[in-house]
Structures are given as C-alpha cells and as structure tokens.
Image (cartoon, rainbow, N blue to C red):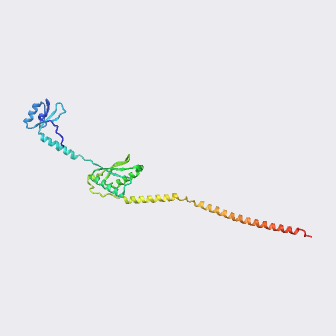
Amino acid sequence: MPDRDTTRINEKIRVAEVRVIDDEGGQVGILKIDDALKLAVEKGLDLVEVAPEASPPVCRILDYSKYKYELAQKAKAAKKGQKQITIREIKFRPKIAEHDYATKKGHVTRFLMHKDKVKVTIMFRGREVTHPDLGRAILARLTRELEPIGTVEQRPNLDGRNMTMVLGPSKEVISGEITEFEPLDFSAEIAAAQAEADAEAFARSIAASAPPPRAQAEVEVAEAELAEEIVADEVAVEADGEAAAEAAEEVVEVAAETSGDTPDAA
C-alpha cells in the first residue's frame, strides 16, 4: 500500500503567514497566505509547504507533480545505492554424516556466491554439549573448504546448546572476480587422519593392558640368581650324600669292633 501523501499544497495550507521561495529559488519573504497563493496562481504553479516545522512555515512556488516525480527518483536512486544485506542460516549436528555435511556445505556455497552472509549453527543435544570440540572441528573444516569465497565475520561462539559462526562473502566474490566455485573436499584427508588416530589409540590400549617389560639388566640378574640357587641346591644334595655314606661306614666299623671283642661262649 503506497504511503499517504501528507504534503500540504495551495488551499490545504491553513496558516496566516508563510515564508515564500519563488520558482527560481529566490527569497520572496514573509507573505499573507492569500498573497502567496495569488503569486503562485499568477505563475501557473503551486504553493507547496516544504518546511512546516519552521515559524512561519516555508513554502515554495513550483510544479508539484514535477516535484513529486523528482523526489521519487531521488528516493529510488538512494535505495538502489544501498546494499541489501541478507543473512541466511544453516544448521549442523556435531555428529553429522558425511553426505549431509556435503549437502549443507553446498547450500552455504550457494548463499556466499549470491553475496549473502551465512550464520552457521551447530546444534548440541543432551551430553553432546560437553564436547564443544566436535562443533569447532566442523566449523574449522567448513571455513577451510570455503576459504576462497568466504571469510569469518564472527568467530565460533557457544551460547547455551548452540555454537554459531558467521561467514561473509569474500572480496573476490563481492567484486565479481570469482563467479564459479567448486567447494574443496578434505574428507579423504580427514578420514586418513582419523584412521591414524584410531590406530594409535588402539596401540596405546594394547600397551596399557600388557605387563610392563622388565629391563634387560634385571632379567640378567634374575637369571644369575636362579643359576646360583640351582648350583647351591646341587652342592647341598651332594654334601648330604657324602655325609650319609661316611656315617654308614662308621656304624659298620663300630659293629665289627664290638663283635671282635666279645668272649666266646663256654
């Protein structure tokens, strides 16, 4: 609906006196309203109130239709010169699938190429909010893959359960230097890094569950001590055997001597 024209002209000007400016921009001075209207009629033009807040109000003698057209053209030119800023929003989840990520990245690319700003939001649910690093990783990856056409205008900020970042079109996009862009893809690189990290984590878990390795010196000392114990046991066994044999011989000798000293029976 067009705005209602509130400009007062000719008989709609209901004041006793007005300050008049003629059709050539000259100052006529303060006139009675009837005299000002008469002057405008003589020139075949309109008396238009241009400064109603002044005391007395200021009126100009001009062609009102032409005046309205010129005002409309100026307003249109001013509006055309203004840059219309549109902010779009794309939402991600911290555990987003690779296919969904690629689709949403395509939307962000299209918005930036259209010279719109994009608010990227990571939505956390439940205990996901305790792992903000997941959200930062997604935003960092998106920034890296769209670096030629997008610049970070608002760094990642965690507010409640949402982490937001604002991307704006790059200077090359705004100036028209970049008109086509195929988003970069680091998914293979990220997958390889993740696989390497998983392998290292698995190796650490195996190492943690295995008994701690003994130092080589400790092993050698333990083996030497064990050998000494075995030798000592063998020596002790041999010594016990020799002692038993000697004792047996002594018993036999004593028995023989006793037998020889006993008188024969009569």
Q: Is residue 218 above or below residue 256?
A: above
Q: Quadrant of the N terminus?
A: top left
Question: Residue 145, percent across and down?
Answer: 34, 56
Query: Can residue 103 be seen from the camera position used here?
Result: yes
Q: How many marks are shown on the rendered structure?
A: 0
Q: Please indicate whether residue 134 sits to the left or right of residue 178 in the image.
A: right
Q: Is residue 115 above or below residue 227?
A: above
Q: Nearer the viewer, residue 148 or 229?
A: 229
Q: Answer yes or no: is residue 172 visible.
A: no
Place of residue 192 in the rendered image (x, y in percent of width and height, measured from the top left)? 40, 60
Instruction: Kindly identify the residue that appears in the image at 10 percent across and 31 percent down.
Output: 34
Where does residue 255 sit, x and y in percent of width and height? 83, 67
Q: Could you tell me which residue is drawn at 10 percent across and 33 percent down?
A: 37
Residue at x 78% of width, y 67% of height:
248
| Drawn side of residue 48 relative to residue 252, left or right | left
**Which quadrant of the rendered structure holds the C terminus?**
bottom right
- Above or below: residue 131 compared with residue 253: above
